[in-house]
Amino acid sequence: MTTATDREGPGHEPGRWWVPDGNRDWQEGDRPPGNFGKLTIHDVTLREGEQGYGVILTAKEMVRIAEELIRVGVPRLEMWPILSRENTEALTEISKLSPDLDTYALVRPGFQEDLDLAHRCGAAGVMVFTLSLNDWIAEHALRKNADRIVDEIVEGIALAKSDGFKVVCGPGDAFRTPPARLRRLFSEAVEAGVDSVSVNDSLGQALPSTFEALTREVRTWVGNRVEIETHCHNDFGMATANTLAGVRGGADVVECAVNGVGERAGNASLEEVAVGAEILLGLDTGLDLTRLLEMCRLASDVMGREVPVNKAVTGMSLHHIWTSLHAAWRDRVSKAGRPEAWTPFVPSVIGRDGYQVDLGPMAGKNLIRMKLLELELSVPEEALGLIRDRVKEEGRVRKAPVPMQEFRRIVEQVLKETGLAAQPVTGGLDG
């Protein structure tokens, strides 16, 4: 029998997770030496997240979310102070919360009023942003010449640096920008003193392989002189995958939002990226992963946006037992000393208190036994089949899990009708 102290390879953390070793087979040599083994989280929940449909936050609610981000250990947070009085008030208060948090303000390139407001709010850095450097989009949507926009961004970076800010160059729509123009922008941004450049997939259209390839190319342009960031959207469901692909390609900083909120289908999910970076890529994000679930619940409550049960990383069903087969598997691997063998990671990694067990149409004898043991109920083996059948039918009628009060009633009813006496259940889940 194996024990929980046995380590199979670099992807195995006994008692916590067990993922393919091949996930760790990537080179960090394209990143600045000081960033080896580390990844910085740049949170955009209070900037792009508030742009998500139906997300309306008061200044007080923004501060609540920021306080939770600080507890988790997020080192950078971005807002858009010029957008509203609430954003200005919130950023001003948030900037004072912790010396370990750098606040960033989204600014228009070259707008001194944006920089002045960022200073008044106490921001440590700014994100100099534009929507697109694609020729057609620049002409028809922005009504500007794309090359002139590059000039404006570089001038805006120089102005922000002269005002004492840390500066991120964040041009949108990088994957529909001519590579030569993007290279020119990033190269001139470096000369202007920028601190990091962002590879931005504004419409979530890139494949992970495409995202990794462009990030690697950007690293050849800027060398190790500045950091590279990722900014991914989830229109095709690949924001987290693209973010991690960008990290594999040399990115040092990842821009993401709690629960994946943001424009349209949202941004890369902070909790997914953090857990993926630590477990799949073996990086240190500096975050307390055990607080992630609490953070996501708070944001969900404040924003009024329920987390789907099948949401990656934090969805309820990830650590939920609904089928009898899985109940038996989990019980067996746990008894054999490797609870991490049944799910990608154990519930405690994200701060969840164990597995949730529910009864319904997928219930079998193993699951009935598990729930009986959980409730400290005991019935003879002969009654299990009857209880199972009634639980299945009750679940189908309800089209929902069977409440525990109803389960107790079913058990009592079966015992009464059969005349069987209560006794300890024997054999565990393998009986």
Image (spheres, grey):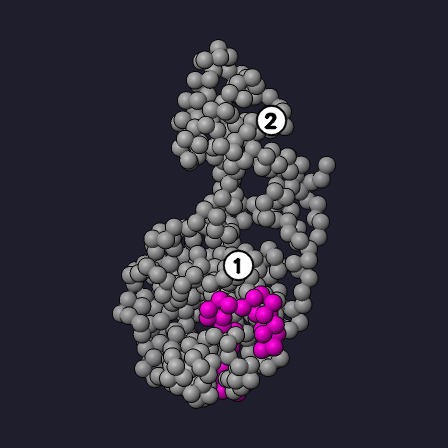
When the figure is inspected, residue 224 is found, relative to residue 206, above or below; the finding is below
Front-most of residues 144 and 46: 144
Q: Which mark is first along the chain, 2 or 1?
A: 1
In the picture, the disc for residue 326 is none
In the picture, the disc for residue 274 is 1
Q: Position of residue 332 (x, y in %)?
A: 64, 34
Crowd band around label 2 with a 10 angstrom C-alpha radius: few (<14), some (14–19), many (20+): few
Residue 395 sits in which quadrant? top left
Q: What segment is highlighted magenta in the picture?
A: 191-218
Residue at 46% x, 63% y is: 235
Report the number of numbered marks.
Answer: 2
Query: Are the residues tagged 1 and 2 within 8 Å (C-beta)?
Result: no
Q: Secondary structure at mark 1?
A: helix
Quarter the N terminus occupies? top right
Q: Position of residue 341 (x, y in %)?
A: 63, 44
Residue at 50% x, 24% y is: 389
Is 62 covered by the magenta stretch? no
When the figure is inspected, residue 42 is found, relative to residue 178, above or below; the finding is above
Q: Position of residue 114 (x, y in %)?
A: 34, 79
**Residue 270 appears in view:** no
Residue labelled with disc 2: 428
Front-most of residues 74 and 172: 172
